[in-house]
Image (cartoon, helix red, strand yellow):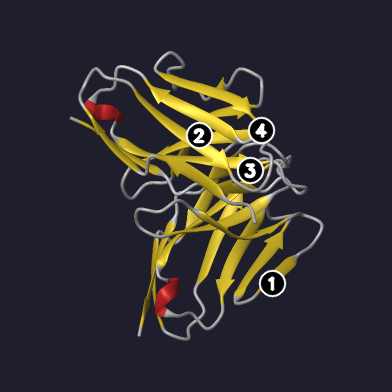
Amino acid sequence: QQQVKQSPQSLIVQKGGIPIINCAYENTAFDYFPWYQQFPGKGPALLIAIRPDVSEKKEGRFTISFNKSAKQFSLHIMDSQPGDSATYFCAAGASYDKVIFGPGTSLSVIP
Amino acid sequence: GAVVSQHPSWVICKSGTSVKIECRSLDFQATTMFWYRQFPKQSLMLMATSNEGSKATYEQGVEKDKFLINHASLTLSTLTVTSAHPEDSSFYICSASGLAHGEQYFGPGTRLTVT
């Protein structure tokens, strides 16, 4: 019940495209769903996070969609840029507690 | 805001020696800190959770006598890798939580190489 699944494993899009990364969780007690961006050799940076009381959250070019009944959530990156090329991790957990990371998605945005 | 630092950023040590890694929350009080390790092209694996003034809680399979964690203050946690071996070579990352909504903010990581 602690696993977080993430797909796709890798993704290539052209500049301006909208990459979508999907995640699924099992534990219904989870109430905190963050997304992290990681560049090689760096620690993960918190991008955006959502809680189950809303179905969508947007911050800049990043949007999270959340489906509580399906236990799924996804990240959309609008107008993607080459600088967005990185590894993206979804995570899930309970507030103020540990989060479980998905396996990651390597995104490449080509000019 | 929400800046977490780690020191050192990279370290090389000889097999059998011990290495200490520091994690600091610079602009907030971290009631909880987490330690992760990450192998190349893999996800982050949680090693332990530490609350200020309490003993750390280790994840299954993590040797608590090998990875000593101390969370002595609300802004500092340390991870000591004791009697390091080449298989301990990895990227160690800490995170800190303590803000109003419980978000975790990560440090830049420490690359440990054991020769």
The mark lying in front, picked from 4 and 2, is 4
Q: Please report whichever mark, 4 or 2, sits nearer to the chain's N-terminal start.
A: 2
**Total count of labels:** 4
Horizontal side, residue A80 vs residue A85: left or right? right
The answer to whether mark 4 and mark 2 are in CB contact below 8 A is no
Q: Secondary structure under badge 1?
A: strand
Going by the image, does B108 lie left or right of A97? left
Tell me: residue B44, above or below residue B76: below
Residue neighbourhood size for the residue with mark 1, other residues' Cα within 10 Å, grouped as few (<14), some (14–19), many (≥20): some
Mark 2 lies on residue: B35
Q: In what element is the residue under mark 4?
A: loop
Q: Where's the N terminus of chain B, which quadrant?
A: bottom right
| A106 shown above or below A71 | below
Three-letter amino acid code at the position of disc 3: Glu
From the viewer's perspective, is the residue at label 3 or at label 4 nearer? Answer: 4
Element type where label 3 sits in the image: loop
Residue on which the image places disc 3? A26
Q: Which residue is farthest right?
A: A53
Q: Quadrant of the C terminus of chain B?
A: top left
The secondary element bearing badge 2 is classed as: strand
Going from N to C along the chain, the mark reached first, 1 or 3, is 3
Classify B100 as above or below B56. below
Tell me the residue at 49%/74% (across/down): A19
Q: Give how far apart the Cα atoms at labels 3 and 4 are.
A: 32 Å
Kindly identify which residue carries mark 1: A58
- Residues at marks 1 and 4, common chain? no
Residue at horizontal 42 percent and vertical 32 percent from the top: B21
